[in-house]
């Protein structure tokens, strides 16, 4: 029986280790919805629609009803009572509602230490002396945490970017590639359930071939 030389075994082992490391370093492109636990997604999908025809001009300007969501005009008093009774029963039973999902810090544990690539908008948290962004929240839509209420914590990613970069406009989206860590960060602008380390930023374009170079 022919034996494999020790040097060949060593080279083979190094090749296997290198292949495994390369596979682990490749980022998986995900969408924001992928970060939501299944129950949170289901609850958010159950948010009732606002009947804008029932709102006053002032309420329409704010796009919110002062006394909460109003029932549709074609709903009966009996249906309203049933809906209220169901809501009370769920609260008493300790069941979660869509309101809980809006502030949920629950995460998907399988993303811990996973390298991902995700498109989003940047909300600056801290600048260096050269006015470069060195800490920020990555969020799914423009204006989050600034002009409109923040998304749920499990839809916000905290990023520390020590080398810093100049952010020209808040409405410019970016691809962020990095390793996800399950940890919470809280600040006056929002509360995040995920963090991302070893991040590379790319200005977002519709196609990969049109993307600009990684920021230096």
Image: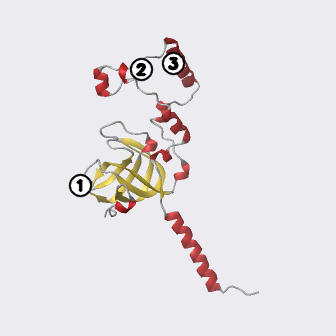
Q: Is residue 167 visible?
A: yes
Q: Is there a contact, CB below 8 Å, between mark 3 and mark 2?
A: no
Q: Which mark is residue 70?
A: 2
In three-dimensional space, the C-alpha distance between marks 3 and 1, rounded to whole angstroms, equals: 51 Å
Of the residues tagged 3 and 1, which is closer to the observer? 3
* In this view, 3 is above or below 90: below
Q: Is there a contact, CB below 8 Å, between mark 3 and mark 1?
A: no
Occupied quadrant, residue 197: bottom left
| Dot 2: element | loop
Pointer 2 local density, CA inside 10 Å: few below 14, some 14–19, many at least 20? some
| Dot 1: element | loop
Give the side of residue 75 with respect to residue 160, left or right: right
Q: Which mark is residue 95?
A: none
Of the residues tagged 2 and 1, which is closer to the observer? 2
Q: Position of residue 180 (x, y in %)?
A: 47, 54
Residue drawn at the location 59% of the way across and 73% of the way down: 16
Residue labelled with disc 3: 84
| Dot 3: element | helix
Give the side of residue 80 with respect to residue 57, left or right: right
Task: Between residue 32 and residue 157, name the one nearer to us.
Answer: 32
Q: Position of residue 196 (x, y in %)?
A: 43, 54
Residue labelled with disc 1: 131
């Amino acid at each position: 029986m022919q034996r494999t030389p020790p040097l060949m075994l060593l080279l083979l082992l190094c090749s296997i280790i290198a292949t495994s490391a390369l596979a682990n370093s490749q980022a998986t492109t995900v969408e924001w919805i992928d970060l939501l636990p299944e129950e949170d997604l289901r609850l958010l999908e159950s948010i009732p629609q606002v009947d804008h025809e029932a709102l006053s001009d002032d309420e329409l300007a704010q796009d919110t009803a002062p006394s909460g969501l109003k029932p549709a005009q074609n709903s009966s008093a009996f249906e309203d009572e049933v809906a209220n009774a169901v809501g009370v029963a769920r609260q008493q039973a300790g069941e979660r509602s869509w309101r809980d999902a809006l502030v949920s810090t629950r995460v998907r544990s399988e993303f811990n230490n996973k390298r991902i690539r995700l498109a989003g908008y940047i909300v600056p948290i801290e600048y260096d002396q050269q006015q470069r962004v060195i800490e920020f929240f990555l969020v799914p839509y423009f204006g989050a945490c600034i002009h409109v209420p923040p998304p749920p914590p499990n839809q916000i990613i905290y990023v520390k970017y020590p080398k810093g970069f100049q952010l020209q406009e808040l409405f410019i989206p970016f691809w962020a590639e990095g390793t996800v860590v399950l940890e919470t960060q809280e600040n006056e602008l929002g509360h995040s359930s995920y963090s991302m380390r070893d991040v590379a930023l790319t200005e977002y374009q519709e196609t990969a071939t049109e993307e600009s170079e990684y920021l230096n």
